[in-house]
Amino acid sequence: MAQLRGKGGGQAGMGGVGGYGGYQQMDPEQQKAQQERQKAAEDQRTQILKAILSPQARERLSNIAMVKKDKARKVEDMLIMNAQRGAIGGQIDEAQLIEMLESINEQTEKETKVSRLLPPVAVSSLRGR
């Protein structure tokens, strides 16, 4: 992943020369090459996920991606990283994916606290003054 970021990271933001808003404009050939690199990286990512996830687990992850794209992407990144390190032996089934998702939820769970300065009744009574 870092390699992919390193390859495409030098295209924009180089001193603002010849560009708009600080970004250097790429010629069509550079844009096409960058798009091809991104497509190749996505294809490789898809192939790795197909190899390490059962069809049911892939379906569950794609359902999550429909609702929470960033969360699904983080899970995919984690799975790919573990696969590249050799930490995954065989395919991950849906039950194992659910366990992983639950542990991730526990780690990232944040409590949202809503506090009101005045109850709604008090606010409406202030408007009448």
Image: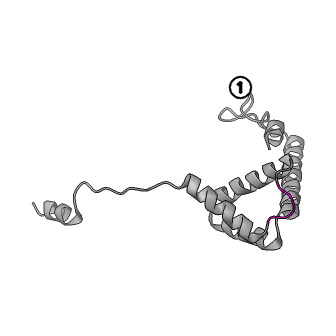
Closest to the observer, 64 or 92? 92
Span shown in magenta? 88-92
Q: Which colour scheme is used?
A: one colour
Q: What element carries label 1?
A: loop
Quick check: is 42 in the magenta stretch? no
Give the percent coordinates (x, y) of residue 28: 86, 44
Task: In the displayed orientation, state which residue is furthest to the left.
Answer: 129
Residue projecting furthest to the bottom: 56
Judge by depth and name the residue closer to the eye, 34 or 26: 34
Residue 65 visible in the current orientation: no
Residue 95 shown left or right of residue 28 in the figure = left
Q: Nearer the viewer, residue 31 or 84?
A: 84
Left or right: residue 63 compared with residue 44? left
Above/below status of 106 relative to 30: below
57, above or below 38, in the image: below
**Hey, what amino acid is under mark 1?**
Gly
Q: Picture coordinates of residue 124 (x, y %)?
A: 18, 65
Q: Where is residue 13 in the image (x, y as percent from the top left)?
A: 71, 32
* In the image: residue 117, left or right of residue 101: left
Q: Give the dominant element type of the magenta stretch: helix, strand or loop.
A: loop
Which of the 4 image quarters holds residue 16? Answer: top right
Residue for point 16% across, 61% down: 127
Residue 118 versus residue 20 in the image, above or below? below
Q: Mark 1 points at which residue?
A: 15
In this view of the protein, can residue 73 be seen by the observer?
A: yes
User: Is 91 one of the magenta-colored residues?
Assistant: yes
Q: Which quadrant would the N terminus be assigned to in this image?
A: top right
- In which quadrant will I find the C terminus? bottom left
Mark 1: few, some, or many residues within 10 Å (few <14, many ≥20)? few
